[in-house]
Image: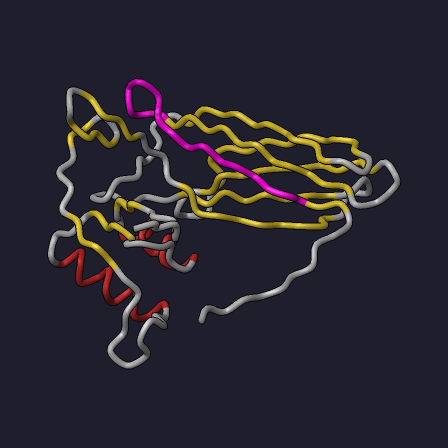
Amino acid sequence: PREVYIYAQPKVRLRDFFARSTLDESYKNGVFDLDVEVKNHTAKKASSTVMYEILDKDDKTVVSGIKTVEITDTISTLNFRSFIPSVRAWSAETPDLYTLVLTMKDATGKTTEVTSVKIGFRTSEIEDGFFLINGKRVTLKGVNLHEFNLVTGQVVDEATAMRDLERMKQLNVNAIRLSHYPQPDFFYDLADQYGFYVVDEANIESH
């Protein structure tokens, strides 16, 4: 079993967002594209301001943007785009991450909601039969992974997952195939942090 949680959001809220963080053709500069969905659950028109910031490892703002939208009982999508010179690219060898922070404010300027997520800038391509990350050929040294613990069975906590990933890095493993189902959220955060290419499988086997 996995833990579940319930949380409450304002009547005018951040419904969803999708961030694309890639590199330009030189593989040196970051290209950022962000879609933010805002939902109004009231019957009245509301004015909301959405701001994003990208922070580096020292929590310094690299780039930011802000937009205001007026919405009724519907969903509005805001798009942000930016270019980041000399970005630190993510790879299994250099798992450099940035922090994306989203902030929402009401018409009075009061902050109503804040959320954040780690992002990495990278590209993945197939060229002449070779797998490329950030324009460089990569040899995948991978393993299959099931959720299993000698004591708790199929219940794997974050500390155990972290220890497994640390051992994989010591053995020069750089890729993991999740056979045959998704892992808990913390697994993907750890994979980003330690530097692993992940083949994520859905639980839809039909042998």
The answer to whether residue 69 is left or right of residue 45 is left
In the image, residue 135 lies at what x, y percent?
Answer: 22, 25
Q: Taken as a whole, is the magenta stretch helix, strand or loop? A: strand
Kindly identify the residue that appears in the image at 47 percent across and 42 percent down: 55
Front position in the image: 138 or 51: 138
Vertical order, 193 against 37 (above or below): below
Q: Considering depth in this image, is 124 or 51 the residue closer to the camera?
A: 124
Residue 81 spot, x, y in % from top left: 52, 25
Q: Position of residue 5 (x, y in %)?
A: 58, 66
> Which image quadrant for residue 156?
bottom left
Q: Residue at x 37, y 53 (%)?
A: 188
Outermost residue toward the right?
44
Q: Front-most of 27 and 161?
A: 161
Residue at the extreme bottom: 151
Question: Horizontal and vertical percent for residue 155?
Answer: 36, 72
Is 18 one of the magenta-colored residues?
A: yes
Instruction: Determine which quarter of the picture holds residue 42.
Output: top right
Q: Which colour assignment does the render follow?
A: secondary structure
Left/right placement of residue 81 relative to residue 107 reads left
Q: Is residue 40 above or below residue 127?
A: below
Using residue 127 as the reference point, say whether residue 75 is left or right of it: right
Magenta region includes residue 182:
no
Q: Which region shows up in magenta?
A: 14-29
In the visual, does 23 lie left or right of 173? right
Q: Which image quarter is the N terminus in?
A: bottom left
| Number of numbered tags placed on the structure image | 0
Residue drawn at the location 79% of the way across and 45% of the way down:
41
Question: In terms of image quadrants, where is residue 121?
Answer: top left
Query: Which one is in front, 25 or 181?
Result: 181
Q: Residue at x 39, y 47 (%)?
A: 57
